[in-house]
Image (spheres, rainbow, N blue to C red):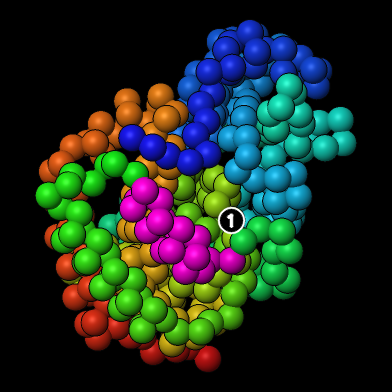
Amino acid sequence: MTTDLAFNFDALTPDFMWYALESIGVRAESGMLALNSYENRVYQFVDEDKQRLVVKFYRPQRWDLAQIQEEHDFTKELAEFEVPVCAPLEINGQTIHQYQGYYFTLFPSVGGRQFEVDNLEQLEWVGRYMGRIHRIGANQPFQHRPTIGFDEYLYQPRKLLQSSSFIPSHLENAFFNDLDILIENIEQHWQPADNIRLHGDCHPGNILWRDGPMFVDLDDARNGPAIQDLWMLLNGDRADKLMQLDILLEGYQEFYSLPSEQLKLIEPLRGLRMVHYMAWLAKRWNDPAFPQAFPWFADGKYWEGQVLGFKEQIAAINEKPLSFQPQW
């Protein structure tokens, strides 16, 4: 099975990480507890001052220094405006450190429960803070980070999947035929929108709940339409989504006005994520963590399900979009 930009983290041994931390004057007093992360490697530890910290080693060749710095600057800007985000720690005057080819960053360890997507009170609270995030994000665009677009999310993934050997031969025609129809429908239903700085991957797993929401992991931060940070918080049938959208926007629009036209992008954006996700798994398959965590990806039944998923998503794109009454 061929992939491109294959890379694994074999060099990240406990000794390596200990010396990386020591290089910036941080001494780990406990072992490294691996946290749930596949794109990068993230570990929790206790330092000599009994502080519980998290170290994140960035995947080489993914983001350059300027792009990582933009992520950190945006996160710190949000924190300065009292948005609850897990911001990187500044050590020796900087938040990005290098050790033998790796960029790494330290964060405070922020515990919490999982955000409950069906808890309407929590949803309104999240909407209020998301409005604040977007109000700040709209002040200026990222200069180095990418903008959500067809090339990264559709065309390159299609090319990668075509050159891989993941799709069973008896499904290839159906798979790529329906994928091309999905791409065509996304292109036809795409609406131009103002692009702002986004969290970029604001699914419920990236929101912790303490005395309120805590937004974590801005690793996928980029420019894009505001609705990108909202649609993943909607689930269930159409009636459920309409109710959730109304509650989410009740708090959101106290701080930022979402153009109603962007609701037409929800299903096209869901289609982009679907295609991008399966290509991401294919691209990272040579990293030993991926076959272990996603064994079903190499199973023919998964790809049969994707053909059905394409058809369902094409139908969803062609349905009447969700609507709301803008608040002025």
The residue range painted magenta reads 147-163
Label 1 belongs to which residue?
221
Dominant SS of magenta comes to: helix
Q: Position of residue 231 (x, y in %)?
A: 38, 67
As for residue 151 lying within the magenta part, the answer is: yes
Front in this rendered view, residue 297 or 267: 297
Q: Would you say residue 209 is visible in this rendering? A: no
Task: Write the residue at 62% across / 35% down.
Answer: 60
As for residue 198 lying within the magenta part, the answer is: no
Q: Position of residue 294 (x, y in %)?
A: 29, 34
Where, quadrant-wise, is the N terminus in this rendering? top left
Task: Write the residue at 68% across / 28% down.
Answer: 102
Using residue 124 as the reference point, say whether residue 98 is left or right of it: right
Front in this rendered view, residue 230 or 222: 222
Q: Position of residue 189 (x, y in %)?
A: 36, 83
Q: Position of residue 201 (x, y in %)?
A: 48, 55
Using residue 23 as the reference point, say whether residue 160 is left or right of it: left
Q: Is residue 80 above or below residue 271?
A: above
Q: Is residue 44 above or below residue 146?
A: above
Front in this rendered view, residue 324 or 19: 19
Using residue 32 as the reference point, say whether residue 107 is left or right of it: right
